[in-house]
Image (cartoon, rainbow, N blue to C red):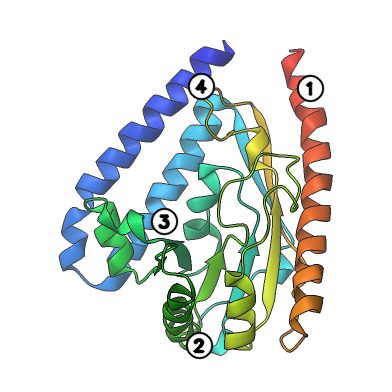
């Protein structure tokens, strides 16, 4: 049954993604908010199919710390753990008009990449070194000026649950944004890798929890900021993983 439900979800996920990409291709010629609306519908659809077919629920905690968005919100950096493909789509649902930091190669994907350009995502050429950091900062400043929350995965790649920051170190991008933008950083912990594992076919029923943590105010020295960010994200993620492991174990006995 587990494999059948995973199969069904994977089929629905790819079919829904293809339908949305093709169906919203004309939005590239329409005003900017139309494309944003389409991205949100895609993400909400994935969450619905994930629950209906694979039995995976979603819980968002710490909403009092979520960036408000808009010019009056002042802008913020969201620094999130990254364990699953789910982490890349949920932002279209839970924050307003996110400017996501992503690898430049994604812009080459037909239609999807064009939509990322349309919605002014922050593409980074990871082979360009310090030049890439400067370009990222320029784009991030433009996004922050509009009050857009800037979403970055500090470790730069998906990490397996339980992986330490020594095994997958935090990259300098988040520190560069923190120093250059002078806005708060909202750390985010999650446990998605236990339910939608990376590089695996099976999906595990249960509850993905994403938790906004207490914001880090601007102006801290770099080393203090780096240590505080790692500690908050890693400790909260470990707690969520332990909580989720008990749920996965209970589900496996059903």
Q: Is residue 171 left or right of residue 224?
A: left
Coordinates of residue 70 in the picture (x, y in percent): 50, 82
Quadrant where the image shows the N terminus: top right
Residue 40 numbered mark, or none = 3
Residue 6 numbered mark, or none = 4
Residue 71 numbered mark, or none = 2
Task: Please report the residue visible at 47 percent of the width from the left and 89 percent of the height from the top.
Answer: 145
Whole-number angstrom distance, CA of label 2 to CA of label 3? 21 Å
Whole-number angstrom distance, CA of label 4 to CA of label 2? 41 Å
Which label sits in the foreground, 3 or 1? Answer: 1
Q: Is residue 239 left or right of residue 47?
A: right
Task: Please report the residue visible at 28 percent of the width from the left and 72 percent of the height from the top.
Answer: 32
- The quadrant in which residue 125 appears is bottom left
Considering only order in the chain, which callout, 3 or 2, is on the residue closer to the N terminus? 3
Coordinates of residue 43 in the picture (x, y in percent): 44, 49
Q: Is residue 5 left or right of residue 193?
A: left
Outermost residue, top direction?
1
Answer few, some or many: residues within 10 Å of disc 2's Cα (few below 14, many 20 plus, some between 14 and 19): few
Considering only order in the chain, which callout, 4 or 1, is on the residue closer to the N terminus? 4
Which label sits in the foreground, 1 or 2? Answer: 1
Quadrant where the image shows the C terminus: top right
Q: Which residue is mark 1?
A: 249
Q: Is residue 85 above or below residue 176?
A: above
Considering only order in the chain, which callout, 2 or 1, is on the residue closer to the N terminus? 2
Answer few, some or many: residues within 10 Å of disc 4's Cα (few below 14, many 20 plus, some between 14 and 19): many
């Amino acid at each position: 049954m587990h494999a059948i439900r995973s199969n069904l979800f994977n089929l629905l996920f790819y079919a829904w993604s293809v339908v949305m990409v093709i169906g919203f291709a004309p939005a590239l010629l329409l005003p900017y908010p139309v494309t944003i609306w389409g991205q949100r519908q895609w993400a909400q659809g994935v969450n619905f199919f994930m629950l209906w077919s694979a039995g995976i629920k979603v819980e968002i905690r710490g909403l009092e710390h979520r960036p408000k968005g808009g010019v009056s919100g002042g802008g913020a950096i969201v620094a999130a753990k990254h364990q699953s493909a789910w982490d890349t789509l949920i932002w279209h649902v839970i924050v307003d008009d996110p400017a996501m930091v992503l690898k430049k190669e994604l812009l080459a994907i037909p239609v999807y990449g064009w939509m990322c350009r349309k919605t002014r995502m922050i593409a980074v050429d990871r082979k360009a070194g310090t030049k890439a950091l400067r370009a990222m900062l320029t784009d991030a400043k433009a996004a922050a000026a509009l009050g857009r929350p800037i979403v970055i995965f500090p470790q730069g790649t998906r990490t397996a649950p339980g992986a330490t920051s020594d095994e997958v170190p935090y990259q300098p991008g988040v520190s560069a944004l923190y120093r250059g933008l002078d806005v708060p950083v909202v750390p985010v912990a999650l446990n998605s890798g236990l339910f939608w594992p990376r590089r695996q076919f099976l999906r595990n029923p249960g509850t993905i929890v994403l938790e906004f943590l207490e914001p880090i105010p601007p102006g801290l020295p770099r080393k203090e900021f780096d240590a505080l960010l790692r500690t908050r994200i890693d400790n909260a993620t470990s707690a969520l993983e332990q909580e989720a492991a008990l749920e996965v174990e209970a589900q496996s006995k059903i």
